[in-house]
Image (spheres, rainbow, N blue to C red):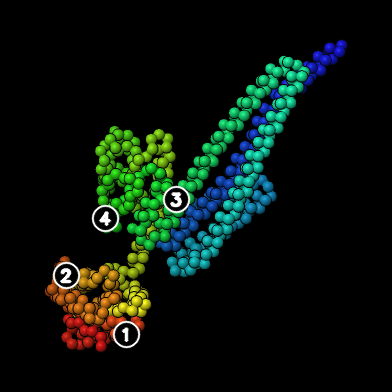
Amino acid sequence: MRSAKHLRFVVLAVFTVMVLVAAVPFWLNRSVNVLLAQTRADRLAQQRLDDVLTSLRDAETAQRGFVITGNEAFLEPYERARRTLPSALHDAKELARTDAERASVWRIARVAELKMAELDETILLRRRTGFEATERVVSSLRGKQYMDELRRLVAAEDARGKARRDALRVELLARSGRSFTVSLAATACNIVVLGALLLIVMRMLRARRAAAAQLETQAGQLTEAVALTTRHNRELKLVAELLRAVEAVPSLPDAGPVIARTMPKLLPGVAGTLFLLRDDDPNMLDRHTQWGTPSDQPLAIDIESCWALRHGARYRTAGYDDPACAHYRTPADEAAGRLCIPLVTHDELVGMLHVEGLACGPGEDEQERLAVTVAEQLALALGNARLRETLRRQSVLDPLTGLFNRRHFDAALKRELARARRKEVPVSLVLVDIDHFKRVNDEYGHAVGDAVLRTIAQQLRLGIREGDIACRYGGEEMVLLLPECTALDAGARAEAIRIALGSIKPNAEGDGPERVTASFGVAAYPVHAQDAEALFWAADKALYRAKEHGRDRVATGA
């Protein structure tokens, strides 16, 4: 009876231990799945918030492009943000689990709605009132404050999410430790109660090792995911820095050194060349800058010499048997690992990015993905830089003669006079007036008159030094600003220009007068005047004397 009781007790103990041992893997797996589900939910919620921030950033970029240019094509990211932002905000609210998360998401949603309303208001104002009124609204920095607040809130939520994931990771380790303790206890009971339990314990240990291996595999995958995310974040940071630097350059040629410094950081070991489209020839591209150790690329290429430019899509030379672009200068057996990417923004070609030395195997696809991403962002930045440069050039140049306009002259005169006072050097001013220009317009027409103005403007540019400024002041009146030049030297320079004008045909393209002369009035600081207005009137009086004494002559201020 006692043996039966002992047997029943042993059987019950064995069954209990077996139940405990069998329950351990299921319990551990369920715990792991719960923790992983919570981690995925946190990542998904953070992704939704990042989508909101990215959508608003794209919409803000579209707003800037539309405010600057007035071109409705810039508003496509803005319209997309209007369509997708409500659903993204709704998803973010649905994914919030705690009161603190809900409060944070509601604050983010409110700031996002305010930012979207500010974009709507600015775009509507640009459509109704134009650039200047909109610029004053944009300069109030209200939209920037919204974006700064939105970035702060999203970053704070990201930090809280990271803290939660760290806590989940600690909990996962703690539960694994408890599982190990239960396993040891079951093993000890099996040894005391029945030797057969040893087999069960061994099986349980094998199950535990399998679970540990699974956890190790998952941990490795998580490590790889973290490393990939870190690398992508670094790439995004470098791309953002590159775009900010390109946006800050005063002119397009200045972007070359910036690009050459950043590209080796984004694509280590990969060389490259950047070609940009010519302003005056839509079929030719000039070599702009290079980095790494690139092959010998031509200074200029046409669209037909590159497969990527001909087809409007990136072209990779992956094997030695692939057709090579005509602009490759190396032998055919060195053509592998090259990639040509057209730089296109708003359906307009800006240039072409050529990279070489791509890694073989899986790394090549990753490098190609990054190169394409950089090219897309670089195309937009270069397109914006070219647009800004064009607008700046149009704002200071006279469209007919190519000389600087009166607005630029007024600013340059004040600047050079201030510099002359600091350095105690002279500044000369030469007023140029074409003699009997009204007669040219009346007899030959305004087209010939415009051609004569262009010819004389070209002669003025040829007759001055680098650093001197030639402007069209108005009508047929032009002005030369000569820094660090005395009145005597300015008069000699004006006399040389006068003689050159008398020896050329005013309109080499067709009909017109055989000869056109001009009168010159010269004045200099500090001999004839002390400020900008007095200096201009001194030169104007000298010009009047030149005309009064028969024109076609140079007169210097008294």
Earlier sequence position, callout 1 versus callout 4: 4
Report the mark closest to the observer, 1 or 3.
1
Secondary element under disc 1, as helix, strand or loop, is loop
Secondary element under disc 2, as helix, strand or loop, is loop
How many marks overall?
4
Give how far across and how far down residue 299 sits, in percent: 26, 51
| Residue placed under numbered mark 2 in the picture | 507
Q: Quadrant of the N terminus?
A: top right
| Residue placed under numbered mark 4 in the picture | 281
Report the mark closest to the observer, 3 or 4.
3
Structural distance between the alpha carbons of marks 4 and 2: 25 Å
Structural distance between the alpha carbons of marks 1 and 3: 53 Å
**Amino acid at pointer 1:** Ala
Structural distance between the alpha carbons of marks 2 and 1: 37 Å
Q: Quadrant of residue 424?
A: bottom left
| Residue placed under numbered mark 3 in the picture | 239
For residue 529, which numbered disc appears in the image? Answer: 1
Q: Residue at x 55, y 49 (%)?
A: 50
Q: Answer above or below: position of 504 versus 95.
A: below
**Amino acid at pointer 3:** Val
Give how far across and how far down residue 287 sits, in percent: 29, 51
Confirm whether residue 73 shows in the render.
Answer: no
Earlier sequence position, callout 3 versus callout 4: 3
Q: Residue at x 31, y 78 (%)?
A: 425
Structural distance between the alpha carbons of marks 1 and 4: 46 Å
Q: Quadrant of the C terminus?
A: bottom left
For residue 393, which numbered disc appears in the image? Answer: none
Q: Residue at x 52, y 37 (%)?
A: 224
Q: Contact, CB < 8 Å: mark 2 with mark 1?
A: no
